[in-house]
Amino acid sequence: MNSLVSPDDHWVIWTFLVGMAALSLFLEQKFKIIRKFTGAATALCAGMLVSNIGLMPFESPSYDVVWEYIVPLVIPLLLIKTDFRVIFKETGRFAGAFHISALGTVFGSFIAVALLYTLIDDLELIGPAMTASYIGGSVNFVSVVSMFNPPKDLMNATLVADSGVMIIYFLFLITLPGIHLARRFFPITDKSIEIAGTNNSHQQGDYWKPKPIGLVDIGKSLAIAFAIAMISIKTSRFFNGPEMPVIIKMVLGQQYLVLTTISILFPIIFPKSAKKLVGNEELGTFFIFIFFVMIGLPASFTKVVLEAPIMIIFCAIILFVNFLFTFGLGKLFKYELEELVLAAIVTSGGPMSGVAAAISKKWQNLIFPSLMLGIWGYVIGNYIGYMVGILLQAIL
């Protein structure tokens, strides 16, 4: 279908990509209803709308630029300050609850694909991305999607379905501590109050305050991210050569696995430089929103509407198994309800979802651990998602 904007009119296309990403972020901050729907889903749907009504093209070289250059920068921007050795010192026993929940996501993905793969093509290609997303967050979805390249319509239908299912799951988890039946299994005790810090009156509003970011901060963050991306891409291309053994290709030949590894090595090798970085998370998040606008543009409304219902069931199965593992094994290993609720929220929704839930419930002692373990989810999500994808392709 011809569009009003030519596929080669890059200035107009990039103005829309960046402008819509900024607008989606603004709307998410401004309106509660958009916050529940998520800014990412808003960006995606906006992209779908303008292409399907003929304003923007379904295909353009500009979209390839996002895949080739913007997406690889996201991982280093979000991880170059994360010294994962510190995470376990700061999170204590809560880390165990997080990993139980992450294990539930892995099993949930295998079960969901096994139950539904005969109903929809290429489900094994989107399963790894949702595994990674329900361990870390959007950054992992972006990375693992790039590894397995599922059809764009399937990818968009999954994201639309995920937004709806996540709203229901979050609302359920947040209200769970107030449900009498839940408290029969996980009663309030002195231990649970101490772990959550319910009686701690210290305010934690700093998480939502704007941070001062200077021009030099932006320059340093981008320069380091570009350097890590360049080294990672060159390395993965070298080890992905035809003469390389298969096992080497599977590990060192994977661009996003190498990107993740070098990104988490940076703060270990250069701890002082990493601590001084400011603004890298903000830049990485904005780039993710550009990606979400872009992947909406090639999508057909008709295909997304047809495929979204089955993908709702797909996402729901993963999260249902996540829930069973989190609270079943959590009870077995004597975790408190507050820890398990946040573990399920952090794995399925990412670090800031966990922080928001902890603040809203006044579980002060679990706010910082939720943030740290959410970032840890960024680190391990790509590796686990990739391994799930390899196993699914081998099985199916």
Image (cartoon, rainbow, N blue to C red):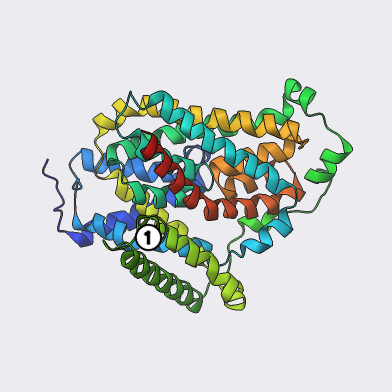
- Side (left or right) of 128 relative to 322: left
In the structure shown, which secondary structural element does the residue marked by tag 1 occupy? helix
Q: Is residue 42 left or right of residue 171?
A: left
- Quadrant in which residue 65 is drawn: bottom left
**Left or right of 184 on screen, residue 18:** left
Q: Is residue 276 visible?
A: no
- Residue 132 to residue 124: above or below: below
Q: Residue lying furthest left in this view? A: 2
The answer to which of 253 and 228 lies nearer the viewer is 253
- The correct choice, above or below, for 302 with respect to 148 in the image is above
Q: Amino acid at mark 1?
A: Gln
Residue 52: x %, y % from top left? 22, 38
Instruction: Tell me the crowding category of disc 1: few under 14, some 14 to 19, or many 20 or more residues within 10 angstroms, Cα based.
Output: many
Nearer-the-camera pick, 155 or 22: 155
Residue shown at 20% from the left, 47% from the top: 56
Would residue 266 be visible to someone looking at this image?
yes
From the top left corner, tell me how far across and down residue 100 is, in percent: 64, 40
Give the residue drawn at x 20%, y 38%. Answer: 53
Residue carrying label 1: 255
Residue found 28% across the figure and 54% down from its top: 16
The percent coordinates of residue 330 (x first, y second) are: 71, 34
